Image (spheres, rainbow, N blue to C red):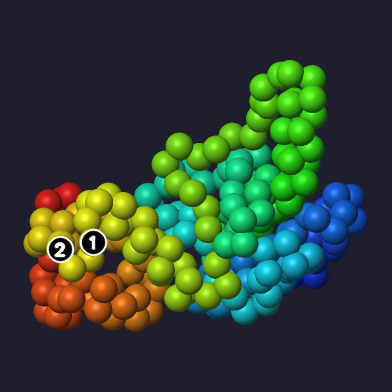
Amino acid sequence: MNTIEEALPLFQQIMDLICITFGENCEVTLHDWSKGYEHSIVAIKNGHVTKRQVGDCGSNLGLEIMRGKIEGGNRFNYMTKTSCGQMLKSSTIYLTNDNGETIGALCVNIDITEALDFQKSFASFIGAETVSQIETPAESIEFHANNVGQLTDFLISQSLELVNKPSDQLTKEDKMTILKFLDEKGLFLITKSGDKVCQFLNISKFTFYNYLEMIRGEKE
């Protein structure tokens, strides 16, 4: 396979099979990174689960794969959360072309909110603690955004937790810590994301690129 598009009919059949098997609370999403990360979703079934549709963007974890931050890629049976608060059991495989380059992803998200509520109620009834067999990623929380603006805001809010200060009290070191975090998360692979970060940090474009050069130079 050289492109997602050439295999799209097959992928759609697989997506239908998964959704028919697991029901309406199971969302299956196909991402094609050649369309640009801002509009990577090229097919989606049961999009009501995360309230996304064709033309929406990928998640923050996909950005980390593109940035080369996460090794291995594929993840199975991990917990994610939607912007509306639903809990999802998720699995993701990253798709490669004949040259071994990652070109997209196939994702399964099953809404287990009601199941977890029932588990909690049942455990309370029988006097036992709830036990989850779902793996939660140690380093990353997956955020399912509808657009890159939401994704950018999510990553900025995460970065602000690192320094634990209001945005108007950030020092140069704080701002560089935030930029390092956002760079490693792959945010700057998104077109014009730097503009929003500059506005948030109250720095010029010149300062932004200067800080990035210093950060990347340290890593080298």
Residue 143, percent across and down? 53, 58
For this rendering, which residue is in front, 219 or 157?
Answer: 157
Using the rendered image of the protein, determine whether residue 2 is visible from the camera's viewpoint: no
Q: Residue at x 87, y 54 (%)?
A: 23
Question: Residue shown at 31%/57% (left/top)?
Answer: 159
- On the rendered image, what quadrant is the N terminus found in? bottom right
Say which residue appears at 37% left-offset and 50% top-offset: 69
Whether residue 189 is visible: yes
On screen, 192 above or below 110? below
> How far across and down, in percent of the image, does residue 192 sit?
34, 81
Q: Quadrant of residue 146?
A: bottom right
* Amino acid on which the number 2 mark rests in the picture: Gln
Name the side, left or right, on which 53 lies relative to 66: right
Residue 135 in the image, given as x and y percentages of width and height: 59, 34
Left or right side of 9 for 84: left
Residue count near mark 2 (Cα–Cα under 10 Å), binned few <14, some 14–19, many ≥20: few
Mark 1 highlights which residue?
166
Task: Say which of 11 and 27 sits in front.
Answer: 27
Q: Is residue 107 left or right of residue 139?
A: right
Q: Are marks 2 and 1 in contact (CB under 8 Å)?
A: yes
| Residue at point 73%, 51% (across, down) | 111
Say the numbered circle drawn on residue 144.
Answer: none
The circle on residue 169 is 2
Packing grade of label 1 (10 A; few <14, some 14-19, many >=20) is few
